[in-house]
Image (cartoon, rainbow, N blue to C red):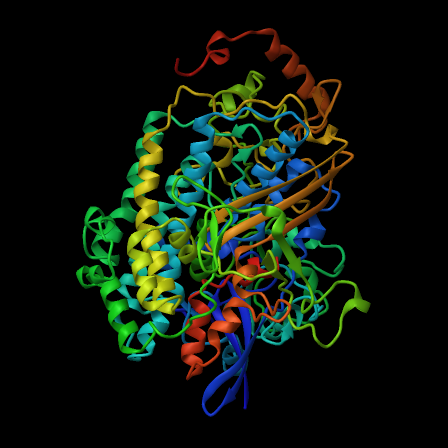
Amino acid sequence: MKTVDIVERIEGEAKLNCTWKDGIISDARIDFLNFRGFEYILEGKSPLDALIYTPRICGICGQAHLKATVDALENVYENIGEKLEVTQKAKLLRQIGLNIEIIDSHIKWFYLFIMPDIIKLDSNDLGIYEPLKGQRWLEACKTASETIKSLAIIGGQWPHSSYMLPGGVVSDPTLMDLVNMQNYLHYALVFFEKSIAGISLENYLSFDSVNNIEKLNSDMKCFKDLCLKHNLQNFGKSYNRFITLGETNLFKNGKIKIKLVNKIDLTKVSENSYFTFSMIEKENNDKKHTWSKSVSYNDNIYETGPLARAITSNRKFIKDIHKNYADSVFTRVMSRLDELAYLIDDTKSLISKINIKEDSFIKPKIILSEIEKASAISVVEATRGSLYHKINIEKGKIKSYDVITPTVWNLGPVYKKQKGIAQNAMIGLPSIEIAKIVLRSFDVCSVCTTH
Amino acid sequence: MMNQSKPTIVWFQAITCNGNTHSLLSSNSNRFELFLNSFNLIYHPSLTINNSLEYILENQKEIDFLLVEGSISSNEFIFSISNDSSKNLLEKLALRSKYIIAVGSCASFGGIHAKFTQNDDICGIKEALENNNLQTLIHPIINLSGCPVHPEWIFQTLFSLKTFGKIDLDEVGRPKELYSTLAHHGCTRNEYFEWKVEGNFGQKEGCLFYNQGCRGPMTHSSCNKILWNEISSKTRVGMPCIGCTETDFPRNNMLETKKNMGIPQEVPLGISKRAYLSISGVAKTFKIDRLHKKLME
């Protein structure tokens, strides 16, 4: 038997094709059928305009694209022997902005995109989690919209600010601005303590063992209880291989197939289009079924995202949950919430490190439109995992621009003979409801996957 | 007649980054709740849980407000939603709607996505619907341009239509009340503009019109009147306006000012070049100390 389901209430839409044998999924395929051609759009544009274009690849992770573009452009300078000086203040303001966007996204994702589905396994009465009506759903939206103000103080607006540019950032916050940023971020902290974990952040951050899940209250407890009741700690397992390309003060890069190696060689990242539609008509054939490409590192595919980051960065609580429940739905969702706690804590500390006396921006001596030929790569840790940008400049214009989003790692099709990460995670599942939850556990952004 | 107590809203996403949805979710929470209590949002692909787009197409015969996010194409191979092209779906929904509102520049004028020229039929909804006889429509199509749209612009438009049934539009379909002023109006850097004090990136002082490409004096929007995320705006923090509410967005070289002999090629809207040059020349002869100093040392 085969089933085809359109999955909504993700970022965009996905088509889930399942093959069933004796009531169990024996094969699954995910199609993303919406292509927007950003890499084509960027061809021939002025390099600085990429700062305006790439954030608009995605309405929820635009700042990650912005940071990837600015890093790529600064790497261009470095590659032509003209490394730019960027102050610590500018670097902090960039990382803070990106962190706030991830905090906003993790909160919205949990309440808008997965919690209603988990509750539904148990009851049709969604209660406080009911979209548009439930008290907690509304509180989550409120918290996200208050928290994101912290980014608007330095970005001017969210979504779609382009406040970072080669040489620094456009804004020059005052001390009171920084205090306001802390205040808005405080909404996320209070919401985490009161509604998400039901315990103090300090207490939560001391967790180092799977047994600590018993100390959780509020929504994480509710989530945990439902997971264990419906076996979500056993569903959604894939290859148990992880990769983190980018590095921050919170995240360590690295990969783990059997043993963790905290070293990444970006030349080993490669894209494959065997199952991906092409704009060139004669390249299309009946094997092609999605606009998503697949991506590999050294010929292997890996899962990226909050779970991967917790593993490569050696965060103890999640590592111990992972030891017990592997790469299941339960572990994946817990990693995202765990990351939220660490990001709130980290971002508060980053804001306190800003020295307002430093420059926000130091003007580059050479302008990009005068560069004859250069190329550069950047990697950034975005909400859903590692984001890769590669720019080629020729005669002062963008010759080509390649974007590999986190969701390509997780949701892409078969690579050589290896089934995609999410695809593999769905094999053996007992129902379409569970299959959709497994798909959701990757935080699906169809918009980014195809871009 | 419109359902007076709680008019129905269908939010349709076509070729989009979902940025307008996230702008909506970043609105003031009291306003957002008032909106949810005053209208019946029966379908939004990211928010509602009970109805799929397929269900709406089959069962919802009348829609009071159709909100469209994203640009439109008839090409189903490149972009399909629920097994159909965005254009077919738009038509099916539009033919049963009383009001149609484009939320964001992509739905209004094609926006960023219309730059994907390999698929050359991407456009805004007005153009996509021009051959349809929209008999249920009781108001011209409304364009709430902006990349993204401001959530207040959506709320104020919807509440005004709910109350008065009609609003005045400018020549490109935008509500006059929201788009008759310029992004420049209310910019905290206005005094620097008046006295022609040039700015730089990364500074609180100076005007971004002269070198950084700011389109504030040429762009219809209320960005500095109805602030972003309630507290901020691009130009206030030091990012030039990129003219995202206008029909020609995105333009080329958006972060620099095109100049001839040191003078901006484009001058503020409706001001003759001669008038602009005369007043600039005069303003520049006065060196106002206060405006050339840091605001705070």
Compared to B261, does A135 lie above or below? below
Taking A303 as reference, is B85 left or right? right
Give the number of marks.
0
**Viewer-closest of B87 and A144:** A144
Task: Please name the residue shown 46% across and 41% down the image.
Answer: A157
Residue at image point 51% right, 32% down: B235
Whether B37 is drawn above or below A354: the answer is below
Residue beneath the point at 58% across and 17% down: B196
Left or right? Give the position of A140 relative to A383: left
| Position in image of residue A429 (x %, y %) | 43, 81
The image shows residue A357, relative to residue A346, as above or below, that is above
Q: Is residue B153 above or below residue A292?
A: above
Where is residue A130 shown, x and y percent of the image?
32, 69
Q: Is residue B115 visible to us here?
A: no
Quadrant in which residue A351 is drawn:
top left
State which quadrant residue A215 falls in. bottom left
Residue A373 lies left or right of residue A224; in this view the side is right
Quadrant housing the N terminus of chain A: bottom right
Foreground residue among B114 and B126: B114
Q: Quadrant of the C terminus of chain A?
A: bottom right
Residue B283 in sight in this render: yes
Which residue occupies the foreground of this view, A303 or A29? Answer: A303
